[in-house]
Amino acid sequence: MENKTFQLADKQFSSRLFTGTGKFSSAKIMEEALLASGSELVTVALKRVTIGHKEDELLQHLSHAQFNLMPNTSGVRTAKEAVFAAQLAREALMTNWVKLEIHPDPRYLMPDPIETLAAAEELVRLGFVVLPYIHADPVLCKRLEQVGVAAVMPLGSTIGSNRGLKTKDFLEIIIQQSKVPVIVDAGIGAPSHAAAAMEMGADAVLVNTAIAVSEDPVQMATAFRLAVQAGRLAYEARLGRVLSHSEQTSPMTQFLDDEF
Amino acid sequence: MMSFKTVFEKFSWEATKAGILSKTAADVEQALQKEQPDLEDFKALVSPQASFFLEAMAKRSHYLTRKRFGNIQQLYVPLYLSNECQNICTYCGFSFSNDIKRKTLSDEEILTEARAIKTLGFDHVLLVTGESGRHVGLGYLKNAMVLLRPFFSRISIEVQPLEQQEYAELQALGLNAVLVYQETYHKEKYSLHHPKGKKSNFFYRLDTPDRLGKAFLHKIGLGVLLGLEDWRTDSFFTALHLDYLQKTYWQTSYSISFPRLRPAQGVYLPQGSVTDKDLVQLICAYRIFNPELELSLSTRESEKFRNHSLRLGITSMSAGSKTNPGGYAAESDSLEQFEISDNRSPAQVAEMMRENGYEPVWKDWELFK
């Protein structure tokens, strides 16, 4: 069964699995894994790309029609640097899409909400399609929505941790309230996590470490492709309510059926 | 103003050393199981007892490194600008008291070296000088930054300690990281090994990372000269320093290097050598203590050791290094700071990385301003 396509800014996607390009043992394995994932949106760290160099190895392996490249601003620490990086990326990769990442804390790479909001506002003003990586903060999501971002990318848990949806309660609120697509980014360590995010109603997920660092990145990418599809289909089919105990049919009102 | 000196002075060398030596096998096991090891766990990991857990430490280190850094290794190259030095360091070939031919690269020579390095594939260059404010002061360094910026997206330095404002000026020109090794945290031994010159001021050097943190540098590199004093105790103080810096300057990245004393002209080798086994233990201890830390290994180490170190926690390596000013092209016969042990070309080192399942990364930075 085919998943329906979904619209994000000016593009249509048939895959709801977005992918990253870091941590792979070679550009060739990255390419094979991303092809197997079915991903149509691939994020690239601008700092890894040799700007103005036509034979950049990373970019060569990403030159497939189905891959839309989304540069990210990884490495910046302030809104000012992020805006500069996005402009550099727009020129280098010829796209106005940008994954806005401002995580000045090198230990856990926690996104800085204050700098991110400021940068998002400026980048939208400059005509960018902005997808900000943020903590699972429902209020911040609404504020970002107000300044005109194309989607929000709240984290499931810390980047690269593979710990799954530790922020589940807040992701649910974000999904419930959001008028822009919600893409769960970071912390998704297993296909089951990805499926859970999709079942919850996330519009897409972004996965990198779990694929890149697995023993068999190509097979793991396939597993994520299937899990994301399964999770989305389940969401669209509307999951049954989860009950904490078995319920009698109607213990309180059954007496109404009695003969008086 | 608060600096590391305040923290440092609360610790005694001897008590710290005794604490490390008293760690038991149970302490090591606990450190290996913890999600967030602390400084006491670090003591256990560098203790003599931990050497019996080397394989378990190596496995944990490998797991943590791969999870955080993935299957990549960073490559950089040192560019020696000058061997002028006004310090006397008992272990160093550039020491003021050594009667060697001194050399400081001219503009033209810097450019010649840059072109040669660029053809080897590098994008990250570490500028190294002796410590001579007279020959390689702020003005010289700023000029070098301006000359080299068009060639490299990432520039780091390992030069004499500077003032906060001077670091800020260099950063404005594109400086990314500063490496400043304390050499040893043993204050009295430090004085013995650094009898003359500005470097003899222990606390000025000790508080240099604070000045770097305040100048908002992207990365600060720490380390001690392994073999100068007891490596376990010295490494604990390095970890203590790191812990303080990470909490104080939380927007800065950190890197640890492992310079082991090597033969140099006119230099004696102190007691207490650090064995390969010790070094493996130390690399693993840092990784288990701090999964995010960059761990860097230079060409001081042998081919064999470097090949294996990739899987033990190392994430960054120099390759094809020349430790003499002009060594790549401009003047290949000037005096080197220390002997290189791994003489492979950068391409050969990159190939070794690939054979071991790692992608060599030459470029991983862009100046965003």
Image: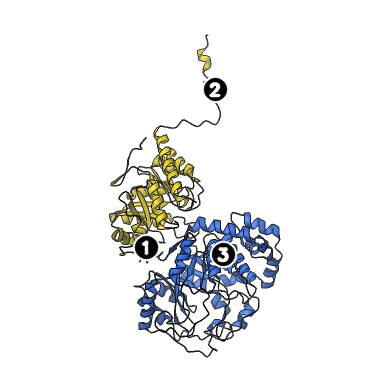
Chain colours: A yellow, B blue
Chain to which mark 2 belongs: A
Query: In this view, which residue lies farthest toward the bottom?
Result: B99
In the shown orientation, is residue B43 left or right of residue B255?
Answer: right
Q: Is residue B347 above or below residue B191?
A: above
- Helix, strand or loop at label 3? It is helix
Q: Do the residues at discs 3 and 1 belong to one chain?
A: no
Work out whether residue A27 or residue B164 is closer to the camera in this orientation and state it: A27
Task: Name the kind of residue labelled 2 in the image.
Answer: Gln
Pinpoint the chain carrying mark 3.
Answer: B
Please indicate, yes or no, whether residue B327 appears anywhere in the rendered image: yes
Q: Which residue is mark 3?
A: B243
Q: Residue at x 42, y 79 (%)?
A: B328
Q: Which element is circle 2 on?
A: loop
The x and y percentages for residue B15 are: 69, 70
| Residue farthest top in this picture | A260
> Decide: marks 3, 2 in contact (CB < 8 A)?
no
- The vertical placement of B353 against B166, above or below, is above
Q: Amino acid at mark 3?
A: Asp
Residue B203: percent from left, percent from top:
57, 77
Q: Which residue is mark 1?
A: A81
Query: Does A202 appear above or below A160?
Result: above
Check disc 2 and report the residue beneath it: A248
Earlier sequence position, callout 2 versus callout 1: 1
Residue density around tag 3, few if under 14, some if 14–19, many if 20 or more, within 10 Å = some
The residue lying toward the viewer, choosing from A62 and B198, is A62
Q: Are marks 2 and 1 on the same chain?
A: yes
Quadrant position of the C terminus of chain B in the picture: bottom left
Density class for disc 2 (Cα within 10 Å; few <14, some 14-19, many ≥20) is few
